[in-house]
Each structure stands twice: as C-alpha cells, then as structure tokens.
Image (cartoon, rainbow, N blue to C red):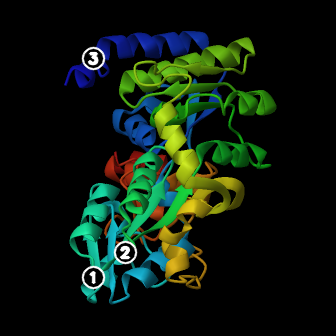
Amino acid sequence: MKYLDEFSDPGPARHLVESIRATATRRWSLMEVCGGQTHSIIRHGIDQLLTEQVEMIHGPGCPVCVTPVAVIDQALAIAARPEVTFCSFGDMLRVPGTEKDLFRVKSEGGDVRVVYSPLDALQIAESEPGREVVFFGIGFETTAPANAMAVHRARRLGLRNFSMLVSHALVPAAIRAVMASPRCRVQGFLLAGHVCTVMGLAQYPPLASRFHVPMVVTGFEPLDVLEGIRRTVVQLESGHHEVENAYPRAVAAAGNPAAKAMLADVFEPTDRMWRGIGVIANSGWRLSARYRDHDAALRFDANAPSDPEPTICRSGEVLQGLVKPHQCAAFGRQCTPRNPLGATMVSAEGACAAYYRYRRLDPREETARG
C-alpha cells in the first residue's frame, strides 16, 4: 500500500505536470512500450493532462496482443488432443484464433486449465504422469525466466510428459521495427520497467543512438509515468538521445544476472511473427537444442493453417502506434470485450480494452454525447 499511495499522490503529480508544461516548447510524440503503462496513462488521464505538450502513442507492449493467429491455432490444435492437458494463463483463453478460442475448445471437451504459474503446470505433470501436459509460454522478457525455470526443472526431474508451446517476444526488436517503419512518428520511448528489471539496460543505448531517440525506463504508477515523460521531454528539448533509468527502485543497469543466465541456457534467439506487424528478425526465443525435447510444437507437429484476420479489425495498426483504438470503425460496435475481433480488445493490457473500459471514445462522439 505504501507505493500505491506514495506514487499516486496528486500533489507531486500536479508538480510534474506543471514541470512538463513549462519545459515543452512544442508537442512531442512519445511511445510507451508496455500495456500496463498504457492502462495507467488512460485510466488516470495522463495524456489528457498533457494534450498540448505530448501525444502518447501506444506501442506493441501487450504480449497477449502480439501473439499471432498461427500460434493461437497451434495452441487450439494441441489443446483439442484427447491425451493433452493444456495449461495457460487466463487471459489467453479468449484470444480468437481462426475459428475459435481456448474457451470453445474447453466447452467441446478439451482439458484446458487456467494456471497462475508455469510451475503449476509442472506440478500437474508430476501428479498426472499419464497425461501430456502442455504450458502455453507467451510473454516478453518479464515472464520468460519463470518459463525457463519450468523447462529446466522438467528436464532435471526427467518429466517426459511436460512440454511448452513457446511464443516469447523481445522488446528491443519491437522498438527497432517500429522505428524502421516509414510511417513512424515516435520521437521518444518510455521503456517497460519490468522488462528492464530482468534484462537491464545494455540493449537500449545502441537503439537510442541509431534512431536518435531518448529512452527512459519507467514504472507503472502515475508518478512513475509522469517522471518518465518529464525526463523524455527534457532530453528532446535539449537535443539529447540517451537511456535513463527513472525506475531505480526496481531496475539495476545489469538486470538480474541469475535470470539472464537461466534464459541463455534454456532459450535461443529466433525470428518471430508479431500479430498485426509481421515477422521481425531475432525478435523471439525458442527452446535451445538442449531442451528441444520439451518443445510442444515439435512434439505434436502443430502447424495449423491460419486465415487472415478480419479486415475490419485494425488491431495491427493499433499495435504499431499508427492509429488510436477509437479510429477503428469496429471499436465499440462489432468489437467489444464480449465479442472481441482482435487481441487488443481481449487482453487486460490491450490498448483497445483500455479505451473501452475507461470510455475513451472518439472525441467527436464524446462532444455529441455531452
């Protein structure tokens, strides 16, 4: 509760807003690379407090949202097998594949279970040796150490009935892809504090230098986000493009050496498809050769064909920061949390879900309703 109170204090928040307004001589376009930060910004109206100074562009920082349809279809095919117990975090169950989602597979008799940790799935594999237990291992660098630990432990225990469908995505590669787009308008980045807690800062200075953009590691509470914005604007106004750590209570420059060692042992880099964006080189992890026996995609030869996503859904453009959710014609109409067309409406960290939940509609509609 201490940090919830301390980093949501309206007094310091007003001071930071005033400081940003006094510093900015023009309107800057900043991208937050974390769905948790997106929700904090929209929930607390931070972007609305700084309308004339900053445009917040919402990036591909939601791991559920960037998981491609092809991987969802792989998961559906594996989960439907009668010998499989398919374990996943709850937010993946409603992400639409080509024809259905994991909830539908469960309703049709598939053994689909919600777990809170990959180690929960490992315990199921230990207690039910007659079942093939598969964990859906998605996420950015934040969740990867726990997934790596589960695979490492399964190998050490000799659990041949445990495997993982891996779809890990890497933040630096996403930043590189965003900046390389000819439509990119991003002038500075708020970096995800939890990712940097694991990986540290070393990967970002080359990107800041190459693209001439400041990057500030930022937390998730309102004061964290405002301080990150303030530092980014100060750099932009002074013509600097450096990496700063505005989240020192959680992030060390070197990251977490033990977690990084585990990741280097269990995973290896691979090209990865990002939903709505396409293939990004070396933007993901797969199980390394030493652990390949625990790769569910290889074990079950799961290469289900996928149809294109609905053309009316613009979630891919939302993920790239090219449009805001309310600029999609389907937003709040054909596409709602009860009937999501894209993963950005499904996930708790998705930008579309944030706009819907906090009633951030098309400004013209808000004016008409008012």
Whether residue 344 is visible here, answered yes or no, is no
Above or below for 71 versus 11: below
Mark 1 closeness class: few <14, some 14–19, many ≥20 residues within 10 Å: few
Mark 2 touching mark 1, by CB under 8 A? yes
| Mark 3 or mark 2, earlier in chain | 3
Q: Measure the C-alpha gap from mark 2 to mark 1.
A: 8 Å
Mark closer to the chain start, 2 or 1: 1
How far apart marks 1 and 3 lie (CA) works out to: 50 Å
Q: Which residue is mark 3?
A: 6
Give the residue number, with chain letter if any, for mark 2: 161
Question: Relative to 8, is 350 above or below?
Answer: below
Disc 3 element: helix
Callout 2 crowding tier (Cα within 10 Å): few <14, some 14–19, many ≥20 = some
Q: Residue at x 32, y 51 (%)?
A: 357
Q: Kindly identify the amino acid type of the residue bearing the numbered disc 1.
A: Gly
The front one of 163 and 24 is 163
Q: Residue at x 43, y 81 (%)?
A: 78
- Residue drawn at 53 percent across, 82 percent down: 302
Dot 2 amino acid type: Asn
Where is residue 93? Give x, y as percent: 34, 69
Q: Which residue is mark 1?
A: 130
Q: Position of residue 30 (x, y in %)?
A: 60, 33
The secondary element bearing badge 2 is classed as loop
Question: Vertical placement of 14 versus 128: above or below?
Answer: above
Task: Let me know if residue 366 appears in the view.
Answer: yes
Amino acid under disc 3: Glu
The residue lying toward the viewer, choosing from 211 and 323, is 211
